Image (tube, rainbow, N blue to C red):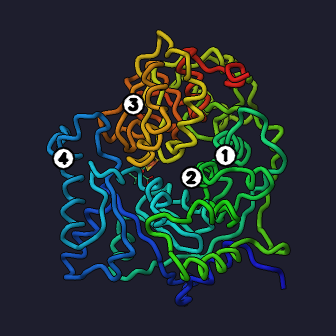
Amino acid sequence: MAGKTLYDKLWEMHEVKRRDDGSSLIYIDRHILHEVTSPQAFEGLRLAGRKPWRIDANIATVDHNVPTTPDRKGGVQTIADDTSRIQVQTLDENCDEFGILEFKMNDVRQGIVHVIGPEQGATLPGMTVVCGDSHTSTHGAFGALAHGIGTSEVEHVLATQCLIAKKMKNMQVRVEGRLPFGVTAKDIVLAVIGKIGTAGGNGHALEFAGSAIRELSMEGRMTICNMAIEAGARVGMVAVDEKTIEYVKGRPYAPKGDDWEMAVAQWRELVSDADAHFDTVIELKAEDIKPQVSWGTSPEMVLAVDERVPDPAAETDSVKRGSIERALKYMGLTASQPITEIKVDRVFIGSCTNSRIEDLRDAAAVAKGRKVAGNIKQALVVPGSGLVKQQAEEEGLDKVFIEAGFEWREPGCSMCLAMNPDKLGSGEHCASTSNRNFEGRQGNGGRTHLVSPAMAAAAAVTGHFVDVRELLS
Ligand SMILES: CC(C)[C@H](C(=O)O)[C@@H](O)C(=O)O
Ligand code: SF4
């Protein structure tokens, strides 16, 4: 019999019961909540007279609706938009009522759900982690089985600590070799999505493997797992190694003492067996990957920075031709235009993809000693959590950004999606380190270009897309 994949092992560890219809009941170790997808779930609990089954399995924070300007220190009342304010207040009230640990807006531990889970050691190897949020795949970087759930499932998990799920197929993306200088985890994952498309991972749990993935820091691994969902896979994972264990050690909710030793011994088993079977295998050579820039309205519409946007006339498939034409029109681009000639209006460095300390260091290395270009209306740096912000300030990164003309903000989802005051104006181009470039994602009529933090900083200081390696060398 073939060996087991990491996913097979995680699944077996958590399968409570197989049901007649082929689905299973799985046990959930960690449930993370935010203000957007939890209100109806708590309301459902109240109406049914239920309480959360295991209170300390839950951890909550506010991220999508919070403003990122310093005046929010005045409290929740300062949130001008009614819906946003009510959602934030409602999460606060629900967590207080049910006794759930929440990092409220002005708590230093507050931040984006997918940043704070790992940061607090609330996400651990071998866990099942769910959250009413599609980018929960991020937590799979720790050798955890993590994916997004819907609001009715949020209620189900609160009430029972279990979830009905169906086992997926196994997929492996192998990236072998050494990443070229100036090329990052974000470029790997954008290149993967460019290759397999946004449906490439459908129905699969995706494990990233190979020497280039092993070389990545935990931050880099989180970046690639974060975008597994944009490749169609709800689950993204990386096997446990010494880096995983080192990152988790000493975090507030990580095991301590004898429990730690026992946990680590088990975590070391969380790797795919050498003879494990994957239903689909994709291979990339790290040496071939260049800094990436998305040009269209889907993450798969992505190219290396030295390429030109496509010419629909060269596309023989009429469906693909139509979608290229529509994307070019929405993005205000002309056929065969070099990526480096696309001018940028705003820059956003943040989001659960790229707002961790390493991302900020990468961007600051480019911004240092330079100035934001005159055509840039706004360049935002939004740390993923209050603790990331604090660390960055200890390292002096805030000063580097401010001196260069960037705005240094409070943590939250910010300009990743238009649910708070940080938005794009219609027709504006944004160099963004986030994960989605759908029409209107960052504001009505806004034009998103997905890039790495270093590439976003390079666009900020030159006013257009440029190969960041020209600025680093
Ligand atoms: C608001 C939330 C449900 C949503 C998600 O599930 O991903 C958001 O975080 C996003 O990135 O689009
Ligand atoms: S930062 Fe963006 S992608 Fe991540 S949870 Fe917030 S809105 Fe979703």
Residue 311 can be seen, yes or no: no
At 61% across and 32% down in the image, what residue appears?
A: 294
Horizontal and vertical percent position of residue 22: 58, 83
Quarter containing the C terminus: top right
Left or right of 299 on screen, residue 148? left
Label 3: few (<14), some or many (≥20) within 10 Å? many
Q: CA distance from mark 1 to mark 3?
A: 27 Å
Left or right of 294 on screen, residue 92? left
Q: Secondary structure at mark 4?
A: helix
Name the disc covering residue 408, or none.
3
Q: First in sequence, mark 4 or 2: give its number.
A: 4
Q: Amino acid at mark 2?
A: Asn
Q: Amino acid at mark 4?
A: Val
Q: Is mark 2 within 8 Å of ligand 2?
A: yes
Q: Which residue is mark 4?
A: 76
Q: Image height check: is 146 above or below 298?
A: below
Residue nearest the viewer, comparing 334 with 176 = 176
Q: Amino acid at mark 3?
A: Trp
Q: First in sequence, mark 4 or 1: give its number.
A: 4
Q: Nearer the viewer, mark 1 or mark 3?
A: 3
Q: Which residue is mark 1?
A: 189
